[in-house]
Image (cartoon, rainbow, N blue to C red):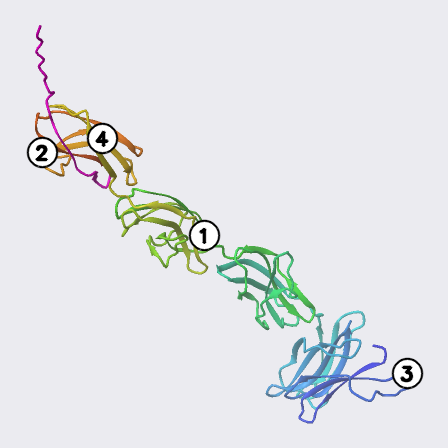
Amino acid sequence: SGDVYACAYGGLGSDGFVVTFTIDSSGNIGNAVIDSLEFDSTYAYQPSLTFVSDDIFAVAYQATAPVTSGKIKTFTITSSGFFSSVLGTLEFESAQMGYFWSHIILITGSTIVCVGYQGVDGDGFVKTALIEGPTPPTVTTQAVSSIEGTTATGNGNITDLGSPNPTAHGVCWNTTGSPTTSDDKTDEGTASSTGAFTTNMTSLSLGTLYYVRAYATNTVGTAYGDEVTFTAATAPVVTTQAVTSILETTATGNGNVTDLGNGTVSQHGHCWATSTNPTTSDSKTENGAKGSTGAFTSSITGLSTGVTYFVRAYATNSEIGTSYGDNVTFQADHIPVLVTDASTDVTGTTATGQGNIVDLGGDNATAHGHCWDTSADPTTSDSSVDNGAASSIGAFTSSITGLSAGTLYYVRAYATNTVGTGYGGNVSFIASAPTVITLTCED
């Protein structure tokens, strides 16, 4: 091109070279070689060079493999005189060649070259070969797999190597679409055969949508497969519902995994503590792996009566971490707390018991009233009255009946819930008949 010329020759060690240099219009040769290409590092005798098309050139020569055979190799030379690597090789004679060197020419109006040479017996041969220009590779993109945490596996397939073979291949990705090798990419190096390949994508951001293309690069340029998308691994989503079946030392935790994320839920359950935002480092249940969304329950144990607990449902993805629901609180149930006040309206056979429920103990009371006996600390196994369920704290009265006049009685208010029966303190009174006063009237 212009004043750039090329020369092919056999080197000192019998290897083959092509060099470029300049010759101006006055015949002056440049002071230095522009570029050089060693097209055969073993043996290249009597090379013959010809232009093919565009920037493609071909060299024919005697080679040793292991006898003296004939080869053609192709490469490109830019208009500035710089070489590509060898693009293609053709062994046009596998038997031993004669002494006289071969000569290669281009058939006008084509990319067919013709090489003439002497055979081993001194007979002459002419052979032709079609030289195709460099072609880009062809690659397809398959769905991304093994999406875990901040990594994933890119999948591609080189369906045609092009010419020359790719010097790099892999996948590239971004968050905006139509990724190129200027974006994040992997490079699995050269490719010498067609077929599927995998590559490890790293440094992804959780929950981010990515666009991915497989690529392969040769001297022609970079070819891309179609675009695929995927979302980097997302954490599971879990919610916490109100705790139920609350007893003195146990309760039932309620939760719901509403989204598994795109990883594997390896563990789920509830965690609890006496301070807010409990984690799996605190008390917890382990209900195992969960392969589908939906509600679940956990058995919360080891509670202390009357203590307020904070509870969160959780779900763990082994690659990403643990997700938690919101806090819910509950107090471990206990027996109701009551006060027994002095009885009123005492007669020989009846009285009115006075009581006050100070604390229901968590669940509503299923029964409440008064119990009495002639001994201290009466229980509901003694004489008692049941006023039914109680759903709120506050004062109440009971009708005490069946008393014997002149007898000392001990009375306690009581209330019963799912944990047990709570009693107020003892109060006492003596059942007494009305006092009869006799009046005598005199004139």
Nearer-N-terminus badge (3/4): 3
Which element is circle 1 on?
Answer: loop
Query: Badge 2 is on which residue?
Result: 374
Identify the disc placed on residue 354.
4
Which element is circle 4 on?
Answer: strand
Query: How busy is the neighbourhood of tag 4: few (under 14 within 10 Å), some, or many (20 plus)?
Result: many
Q: Which quadrant is home to the C terminus?
A: top left
The region drawn magenta spans: 417-443
Nearer-N-terminus badge (4/1): 1
The amino acid type of the residue labelled 3 equals Ser
The amino acid type of the residue labelled 1 equals Pro
Of the pair 97 and 55, the residue shown nearer to us: 55
* Residue extending furthest toward the front: 443
| 67 with respect to 83 (left or right) | left
Residue 15, quarter of the rendered image? bottom right
Query: How busy is the neighbourhood of tag 2: few (under 14 within 10 Å), some, or many (20 plus)?
Result: some
Query: Badge 3 is on which residue?
Result: 25
Q: Does the residue at mark 4 contact the one at mark 1 (Cβ under 8 Å)?
A: no
